[in-house]
Amino acid sequence: MANLLTIDNLSKNFGGLTAINNFSMNVAQGEILSLIGPNGAGKTTLFNCITGIYRPSYGSISLPGEGAFIEKLPPHKVARLGLARTFQNIRLFANLSVLDNVLCGAFCRTKESLLDIVFHTQKFNSAERTVTARAMELLKFVDLSDKLFVPACKLPYGSQRRLEIARALALEPQLLLLDEPAAGMNASETNGLGDLIRKIKNSGITQIIIEHDMRFVMEISDRIVVLNYGEKIAEGSPLEVKNDKKVIEAYLGEGPQCT
Ligand SMILES: Nc1ncnc2c1ncn2[C@@H]1O[C@H](COP(=O)(O)OP(=O)(O)OP(=O)(O)O)[C@@H](O)[C@H]1O
Ligand SMILES: [Mg+2]
């Protein structure tokens, strides 16, 4: 499979602290790649570098298929190239309805000018219908069709995470980055999330997933990359990573959930 994303010799320093140290990896088109590692390993920092929130101190991030280097682009330009994400701490518009939360994502994809929007031109009205239909479709996809008009903050935690995924999907990404999507979920919500992630894969979207729930990671991943103190210490299939000595050592004292 062709590479969708390539990271080369990436480093990110915060003052004297090296959060990512000379990190390289490739992400193949269509795969589910999990990024694991102990707390503070640099996983979220890596997402922030990929999505333009942080400017790397050194190294490059590229989308070979687009012929684009993205490490210096601002977040909205990275999003336009088809990268969408969710956050470790849920970031929904708490008082907006479920539907409106997804519409906010979906309108980023439309081509209407500000004038079209202000004057509610025919072009805008037709775009609004298309976007609303697409948002409803996505909410069906994540199984929230029966909650369209519920304020986001009233949803159970697991459903809020699914709504965040729907909002990210509204950007029609080629690559979806999920930062701890199973955090705070009970066992049945986690199972449902696994099904959703497989459906997303089947729809052709590549995914990078940061997750601490090892059972979930082992089940869902095509490939796993392990970070420790900002460095890649292992990479391979779930089975390879599970039996890797360095990985076992990195998790010792943390109470590994590996089974
Ligand atoms: N904006 C920042 N300023 C200073 N230090 C930061 C900043 N962001 C992250 N760090 C530091 O970088 C290191 C990596 O943090 P990061 O949040 O990427 O870890 P993580 O692997 O996502 O951890 P967790 O599993 O707990 O979410 C930590 O030592 C953290 O304190
Ligand atoms: Mg994190």
Image (cartoon, rainbow, N blue to C red):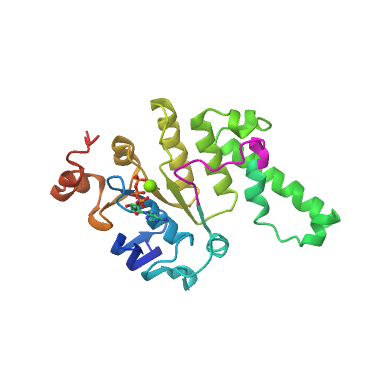
| Magenta segment includes 39 | no
Q: State the residue at coordinates (69%, 57%).
A: 110
Specify the quadrant of the image occupied by residue 16: bottom left
> 28 or 52: which is nearer to us?
52
Q: Is residue 32 visible?
A: no
- Left or right placement of residue 91 versus residue 45 in this view: right
Q: Is residue 96 magenta?
A: yes
Segment tinted magenta in the rendering? 85-100
Q: Report x, y in % for residue 9.
A: 31, 69
Residue at the spot x=37%, y=59% of the render? 27
Instruction: Give the left or right position of residue 2, taking residue 215 as reference.
Output: right
Q: Position of residue 105 (x, y in %)?
A: 62, 49
Q: Is residue 252 above or below residue 116?
A: above
Q: Is 97 on the left-hand or right-hand side of 197?
A: right
Q: Quadrant of the C terminus?
A: top left
Task: Give residue 13's position: percent from left, percent from top.
Answer: 34, 63
Residue at the outermost left position: 245
- Residue 94 lies, in percent from the top left, at 61, 37
Q: Main secondary structure of the magenta part?
A: loop
State the image quarter where residue 233 is shown.
bottom left
Residue at the extreme front: 15
- Number of callouts in the render? 0
Quadrant into which the N terminus falls? bottom left
